[in-house]
């Protein structure tokens, strides 16, 4: 059988100093009280009573700012004004301001780039419209020239047909005239006796007809050749017109495609110029930093008149609103919640007492030498009552539970026997009796008895062998 001790139940609450951290301790409060009886036959006993058990945890911490910020500059330039280390400020005050001349020039340049890009876009759209108009004109001219070339070919063909017909008719007329002259001469020779003069006349007529026949054939050949040449030329002209029109249409279509691409490029340039202006606009306040709350400058790198640039922390600030930050052992953090009341005492004001509440409980643990702890943040009420400063040491007492009107006994009275919780009861005849009990909440001194005992009964704390 093993008697329960405060060390056994509250191993994590032993008051030891580990790496500057004081783990929490459970502190008893005997409101309502119990009754310790005088030892009987060497026994230390306790009369079971009703009362309250307050479970609390003690730890230590330091005062820190509720908010803190470190700023790096987003631009470079001459420092016009800057707060120095230790200076206080109000929310909205200027912490540091650089010359904005460079940013203004960049804004002006970006606006000019937008204007140029817009002009280029307008010109590209105008060229595109002109290309459309030129294509429309080229199509109309092509249709007209094609019709004219087709009509010229048709007319040349008709002229060729006419020339062939007239040539054939002329040749035929000359041939008939020649044959008639010959027939008349033959008939005249056979019917009458021709004189030499008459004979000579008929021969002359025949020769004239032969000459006329030859002339008709020559003229026919010439006219048909001319008509054929005109027709062939009209066909060539029609082909030339076709290819010329095709080339003009292709050129117009290519010009439309080029101007359309020019529009896309101009629109892209305009968007880039607008984006550049927006990016510069995002940095329009990069030359100045405003205070987000009331506070004090913890550190400052630059002073007025110096040249500042981005890349290194320029200043660090902390709020006037203070809190206490403390580390809590893993065995005690599970009993803590936001909003729990905290009693605060400061080493610098050891006669003063402050109240506070838990604001935050960090879910991220720290492990130092195998000791796991969690950070808590405690808000301080009426902190303006005292002159509080960053880094002051503070002791915290946190009430984690307050159970009223319960039965309780000293924690040393409870023992373990084969996995059961038991107490030794002192009977009226002076003998003792072991009894199983069900326990509840406990602190460093007392433990709740939920069942197994009644008020007035006496339990043995020590002295039994």
Image (cartoon, grey):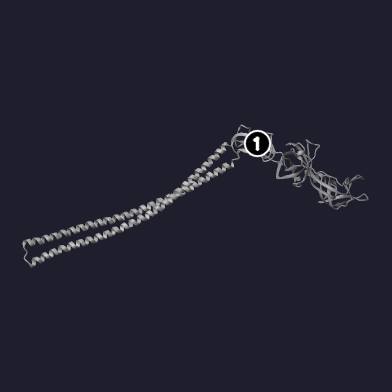
Relative to 272, residue 175 above or below: below
Nearest the viewer among 348 and 442 is: 348
Is residue 274 in sight in this rendering? yes
Quadrant assignment, res 229: bottom left
Quadrant assignment, res 91: top right
- In the rendered structure, the answer to whether residue 122 lies left or right of residue 435 reads left
Regarding mark 1 in the picture, which secondary structure is present there? strand
- In percent of width and height, residue 348 lies at 78, 35
Nearest the viewer among 177 and 308 is: 177
The residue at 36%/52% (across/down) is 244
- In percent of width and height, residue 250 lies at 40, 52
The residue at 33%/54% (across/down) is 239
Badge 1 is on which residue?
315
Q: How many marks?
A: 1
- In percent of width and height, residue 323 lies at 73, 41
- In the rendered structure, the answer to whether residue 380 lies left or right of residue 249 reads right
- In percent of width and height, residue 288 lies at 62, 38
Relative to 449, residue 96 above or below: above
Nearest the viewer among 123 and 160 is: 123
Relative to 374, residue 87 above or below: above
The furthest residue to the bottom? 191
* Disc 1 residue crowd, few under 14, some 14–19, many 20+, Cα 10 Å: many
The furthest residue to the top? 305
Nearest the viewer among 228 and 101 is: 101
């Amino acid at each position: 059988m093993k008697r329960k001790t405060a060390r056994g139940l509250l191993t994590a609450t032993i008051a030891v100093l580990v790496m500057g951290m004081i783990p929490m301790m459970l502190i008893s409060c005997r409101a309502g009280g119990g009754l310790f009886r005088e030892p009987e036959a060497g026994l230390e006993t306790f009369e079971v009573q009703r009362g309250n058990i307050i479970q609390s945890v003690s730890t230590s911490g330091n005062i820190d700012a509720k908010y803190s910020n470190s700023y790096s500059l987003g631009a470079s330039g001459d420092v016009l004004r800057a707060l120095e280390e230790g200076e206080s400020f109000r929310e909205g005050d200027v912490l540091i301001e650089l010359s904005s001349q460079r940013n203004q020039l960049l804004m002006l340049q970006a606006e000019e780039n937008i204007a140029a890009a817009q002009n280029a876009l307008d010109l590209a759209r105008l060229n595109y419209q002109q290309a459309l108009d030129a294509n429309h004109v080229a199509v109309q001219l092509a249709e007209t020239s094609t019709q004219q070339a087709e009509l010229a070919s048709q007319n040349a063909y008709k002229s060729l047909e006419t020339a062939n017909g007239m040539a054939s008719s002329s040749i035929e007329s000359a041939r008939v005239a020649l044959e008639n002259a010959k027939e008349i001469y033959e008939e005249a020779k056979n019917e009458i006796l021709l004189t030499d003069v008459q004979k000579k006349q008929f021969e002359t007529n025949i020769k004239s007809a032969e000459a006329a026949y030859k002339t008709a054939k020559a003229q026919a050949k010439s006219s048909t050749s001319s008509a054929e040449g005109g027709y062939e030329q009209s066909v060539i002209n029609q082909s030339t017109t076709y290819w010329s029109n095709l080339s003009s249409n292709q050129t117009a279509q290519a010009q439309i495609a080029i101007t359309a691409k020019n529009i896309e490029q101009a629109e892209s340039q305009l968007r880039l110029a607008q984006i550049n202006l927006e990016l510069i606009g995002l940095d329009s306040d990069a030359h100045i930093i405003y205070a987000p709350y009331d506070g004090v400058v913890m550190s400052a790198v630059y002073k007025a008149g110096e040249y500042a640039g981005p890349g290194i922390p320029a200043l660090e600030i902390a709020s006037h609103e203070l809190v206490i930050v403390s580390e809590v052992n893993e065995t005690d953090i599970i009993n803590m919640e936001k909003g729990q009341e905290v009693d605060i005492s400061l080493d610098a004001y050891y006669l003063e007492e402050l109240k506070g509440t838990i604001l935050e409980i960090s879910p991220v643990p720290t492990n130092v030498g195998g000791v796991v702890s969690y950070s808590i943040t405690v808000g301080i009420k009426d902190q303006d009552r005292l002159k509080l400063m960053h880094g002051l040491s503070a002791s915290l007492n946190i009430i984690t539970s307050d159970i009223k009107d319960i039965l309780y006994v000293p924690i040393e009275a409870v023992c373990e026997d084969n996995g059961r919780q038991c107490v030794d009861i002192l009977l009226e005849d002076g003998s003792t009796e072991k009894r199983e009990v069900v326990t509840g909440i406990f602190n460093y001194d007392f433990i709740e008895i939920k069942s197994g005992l009644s008020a007035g009964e006496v339990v043995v704390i020590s002295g039994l062998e």
